[in-house]
Every structure is written in C-alpha cells, then in structure tokens.
Image (spheres, grey):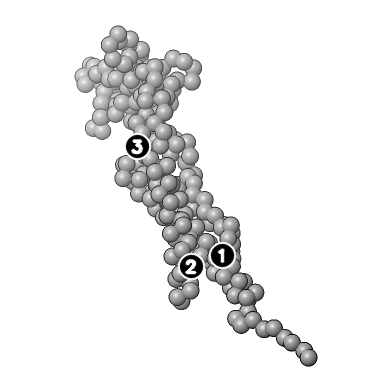
Amino acid sequence: MKLKLAIDPDIVALMAAEVAAGERAVTAAMREAGTSLKSAWRGQITGAGLGTRLANSIRSASFPKSGESLNAAALVWSNAPVIIGAHDTGPLMRSKNGFWLAIPTPAAGKSTRGGRITPGEWERRTGLRLRFIYRRRGPSLLVAEGRLNTKGRAVASRSKTGRGLVTAPIFLLVPQVKLPKRLDLARDAERARGAVPGLIVANWVDRKLA
C-alpha cells in the first residue's frame, strides 16, 4: 500500500506569497513616511518665513533603491544642515575670537557672497572706514561718515560741501546673541515614525484586496 499526503493550499507557496506581500507593504510604507516627513519639514521652513530655497534643501531617499525588503528604510536630510540646525535648536552664538558679534543694520546692505556682510567686506566695498563707538547701555556701534542712498544704504559722499553727510550706524556690536528657535523638526519626525505601523498595515491590506 502506498500513501501520499497532499496539503492544499501549498503552505510553502502561501508563506512565500505572504513574505512578498510584507516586503511590498514595508517598502511602500517607508517611502510614504519619508515623503510625508520631507513635505512636513519643508512646510515648517516656509511657514517660519525662511524661504523656499532653504525649504528645498530638504531631501529624502528610500532604501532599497529598487525592489522590496522587510528591512526597507527612509532617510530625510538637509543639504544645509548648519543653517537648519541653528533654526531648529536656537543656539547661543558668540564671536570666535571672544570679542564682538557684528550684526549689520539696514544701512550695511547685503553681502555679495550671500549671507551677512562682514565689517571687512563692507569697508572694501564702500571705501569707507568704520569707527567704533562704545555704549554702556545697549550694543556698541561701528559707524561711518557718508550719505544714505535711496535704498537706505550708506555710501561714500561726493559732496564737497558736506551736504547730506551723516554718521550712520553700520553694525551693532554684541558679545553674544540668542538665535530664536523657529523650527521643531523632532515633532514631525516623531509623527512620521508613529505613522509607520499603520502605513504598513494599510499597504498590506490594500495589496491583498487588489
């Protein structure tokens, strides 16, 4: 007598199909979580008035690059980590040499290299000399003698009579400054992480129904 045991459905094939469904669900969930976190961080940055250029420094990628895996992951980062980190933590900033931080006033204008203009760059650009004024109360000043143009920036005066000549504050000098905290990236990251289990289940169920 010859006996043969057959199991229907095939358990091995069924388990393999379930693992494949899990890989697809986890991979899709991590991609969604990464994209969602990138959008949330960009929204925070533009909402804080920091501009779309800085917001677009936020990037995301999912792994593996192709195919599916139960170990799929997502990475969200910024191409301007120092700037983003400063607005996220609100650090206390001090001068590197232990003296003063020079904060440009509107009369200083902007740097041609991007970011804040420095006293040295301002003197080279305008040809004017800055003069230090110490104040016991309030920030000390770096001032220059010149005139204010139509944009409110201090420039050299060509007047031989001294007409329109003013002493303009160009930089405020402070020993330190506390950068205000304008972002809370950890909050959105925690939300994205908390949503992952639900996304996995949703993608798993959707695959089965499809």
Q: Is residue 195 left or right of residue 26?
A: left
Where does residue 107 sit, x and y in percent of width and height? 29, 26
> CA–CA distance between discs 2 and 1?
9 Å
Quadrant of the snapshot with the N terminus: bottom right
- Tell me if I can see residue 119 in this picture: no
**Residue at figure coordinates x 39%, y 31% from the top left:** 90
Location of residue 29 with respect to 87 vertically, above or below: below
Q: Which residue is labeled 2 in the image?
A: 204
Q: Which mark is residue 74?
A: none
Identified by mark 2, the residue type is: Trp
Q: Nearer the viewer, residue 18 or 143?
A: 18
What amino acid does circle 1 point to?
Answer: Glu
Q: Earlier in the sequence, mark 2 or mark 1?
A: 1
Query: Which residue, given by chain and number where applicable, does mark 1 sit on?
Result: 23
Q: Amino acid at mark 3?
A: Arg
Residue 17 left/right relative to 137: right
The image quarter containing residue 179 is: top left
Q: CA distance from mark 3 to mark 1?
A: 38 Å
Q: Is residue 63 found left or right of 160 in the rendered image?
A: right
In the picture of the structure, the residue carrying the numbered disc 3 is 182
Identify the mark nearer the N-term, 3 or 2.
Answer: 3
